[in-house]
């Protein structure tokens, strides 16, 4: 097994032209009645992207509860044949993972996607590229994942959630506060924390996953977070964010509104500190974002 530092973050810079931060944007959340409505809205965003271009559609899936209604809808479509041509255009990627861990662990995002999307979905799409968490060389496996994504042209649509952190901060994908992620970092390997493990396990159980003791024990022994970074998020053609679980994660009422209302500094150094302290703010720098939430998030 490859040795990776368990006390520092390892970020991978994207190749090619460096990114520059644009002027931060105001996000106007779209408040919908329930999770089913959010899932259908997310599907219509995906379908709109598909209708606007020819050829393949590269999508980054969101794990946990935030996109469960979308995944259930896609799974139902895959059982029939009406959407087969659309599904056959999809190149599907995951955005984060815990490692080392068996890919078949019930607490892996891959297993959760399979549970919700179903066998028909994965049989009908063009490709599925997860982050490999059972490799003897995690760094090389992540490089291969990134090469595949780059060769296909990068994400057309990136489904994002919003994770609460201490002191009113938040994470996107698994970009943690204080992890040092910069605008040109496309992915990272981050030492895991007890709080991340608890958050991960809790959200899987809340989402309906059946977790046995052996899988939970293996998950609790994970050492790293694999995550896409700010460059992957900002390079996507469209961001679709969903926040639907303030009932089980009430801190999101505070942390999400902090993202909406924080005044971002004009000074580059100060702004970089703000982004490192609260990575949820990265979404404010994307030019094409829609954010779907339930009413209790704004309460």
Image (cartoon, rainbow, N blue to C red):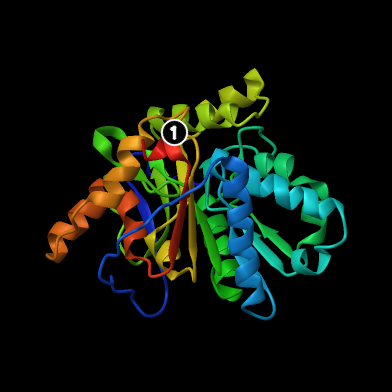
Q: Quadrant of the N terminus?
A: top right
Along the viewing direction, whichever of 287 and 1 lies nearer the viewer: 287
- Label 1 secondary element: loop
Residue furthest to the top:
213
Q: Residues within 10 Å of mark 1 (few under 14, many from 20)?
A: many
Along the viewing direction, whichever of 41 and 94 lies nearer the viewer: 41
Give the left or right position of residue 292, taking residue 151 as reference: left
Along the viewing direction, whichever of 20 and 186 lies nearer the viewer: 20
Q: Position of residue 208 (x, y in %)?
A: 64, 29
Give the left or right position of residue 161, taking residue 286 as reference: right
Q: Is residue 134 visible?
A: no
Tell me what residue is drawn at x 59 percent, y 26 percent.
Answer: 205
Q: Quadrant of the C terminus?
A: top left
Along the viewing direction, whichever of 91 and 141 lies nearer the viewer: 91
Q: Position of residue 65 (x, y in %)?
A: 56, 38
Give the left or right position of residue 124, taking residue 138 as reference: right
Q: Position of residue 282 (x, y in %)?
A: 33, 57
Q: Position of residue 176 (x, y in %)?
A: 35, 44
Q: Is residue 230 visible?
A: yes
Tell me what residue is drawn at x 53 percent, y 53 percent.
Answer: 95
Tell me what residue is drawn at x 60 percent, y 32 percent.
Answer: 207
The residue that label 1 is drawn on is 246
Tell me what residue is drawn at x 82 percent, y 56 percent.
Answer: 123
């Amino acid at each position: 097994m490859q040795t990776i530092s368990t006390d520092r973050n390892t970020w991978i810079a994207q190749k090619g032209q460096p990114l520059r931060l644009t002027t931060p944007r105001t996000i106007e959340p779209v408040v919908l009645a329930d999770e089913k409505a959010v899932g259908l809205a997310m599907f219509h965003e995906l379908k709109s992207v598909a209708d606007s271009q020819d050829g393949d559609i590269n999508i980054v899936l969101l794990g946990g509860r935030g996109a469960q209604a979308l995944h259930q809808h896609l799974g139902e479509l895959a059982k029939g044949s009406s959407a087969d041509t659309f599904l056959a255009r999809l190149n599907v990627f995951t955005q984060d993972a815990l490692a080392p861990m068996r890919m078949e662990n019930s607490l892996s995002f891959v297993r959760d996607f399979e549970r919700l999307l179903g066998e028909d979905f994965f049989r009908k799409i063009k490709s599925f590229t997860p982050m490999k968490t059972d490799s003897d060389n995690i760094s090389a496996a992540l490089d291969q994942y990134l090469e595949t994504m780059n060769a296909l042209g990068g994400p057309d649509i990136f489904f994002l959630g919003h994770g609460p952190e201490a002191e009113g901060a938040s994470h996107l994908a698994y970009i943690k506060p204080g992890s040092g992620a910069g605008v040109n970092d496309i992915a990272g390997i981050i030492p895991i924390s007890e709080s991340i493990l608890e958050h991960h396990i809790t959200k899987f159980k809340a989402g309906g996953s059946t977790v046995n003791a052996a899988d939970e024990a293996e998950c609790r022994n994970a050492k790293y977070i694999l995550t896409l970074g700010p460059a992957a998020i900002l390079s996507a053609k469209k961001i679709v964010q969903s926040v639907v679980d303030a009932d089980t994660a009430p801190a999101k009422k505070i942390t999400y509104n902090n993202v909406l209302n924080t005044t971002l500094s004009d000074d580059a150094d100060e702004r970089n500190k703000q982004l490192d302290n609260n990575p949820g703010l990265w979404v404010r720098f994307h030019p094409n974002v829609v954010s779907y939430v339930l009413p209790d998030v704004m309460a």
